[in-house]
Amino acid sequence: ASQELAVLVTKFGVKVDEIEAFKVNANRLFSERQVFYDADGGKERTDISRAAFKITTKQHHGQRRSVSVMADRCGGLVSFAVVKSHTGKELQRYQSQGEDE
């Protein structure tokens, strides 16, 4: 989800000192931690294949902003982000360029 966090910082101005709440959606459909074992030595390795979380900023100019991020590294070749209003209306959509584009 590092690319998603970079978008929040560069496109929407979210700064770490403005974050009031950070909540992980622990439902396995949205966030999954996987454990793998090294074939050579059997050493345990942990990785996150999916992550979903919500960031809420501190009140600024009379309002708070909330953003939800869902990232799935194993979910296919298309990557996109959707910005919605507080009522759920889609305001803007960002889509990554594919390798062929």
Image: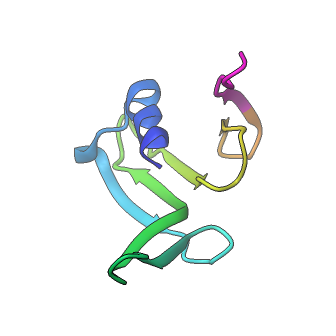
Q: How is the image coloured?
A: rainbow
Identified at 62% across, 77% down, the residue is 27
Identified at 49% across, 41% down, the residue is 4
Count of all numbered marks drawn on residues in the image: 0
Q: Position of residue 55 (x, y in %)?
A: 44, 54
Left or right: 93 in relation to 40: right
Identified at 51% across, 75% down, the residue is 34
Compared with residue 69, is residue 82 higher up or lower down, i.e. above or below? Answer: above
Which residues make up the magenta segment?
91-101
* 9 and 37: which is toward the camera: 37
Query: Magenta stretch containing residue 9, yes or no?
Result: no
Left or right: 81 in relation to 6: right
Q: Position of residue 49 (x, y in %)?
A: 55, 63
Q: Position of residue 35 (x, y in %)?
A: 46, 79
* 8 and 47: which is toward the camera: 47
Name the residue at the front extreme. 40
Compared with residue 78, is residue 48 higher up or lower down, i.e. above or below? Answer: below
Left or right: 48 in relation to 10: right
Compared with residue 71, is residue 13 higher up or lower down, i.e. above or below? Answer: above
The image quarter in which residue 74 lies: bottom right
Name the residue at the right extreme. 89
Identified at 64% across, 27% down, the residue is 96
Query: Magenta stretch containing residue 94, yes or no?
Result: yes
Q: Position of residue 46 (x, y in %)?
A: 40, 73
Name the residue at the left extreme. 17
Q: For the C terminus, give its image quadrant.
A: top right
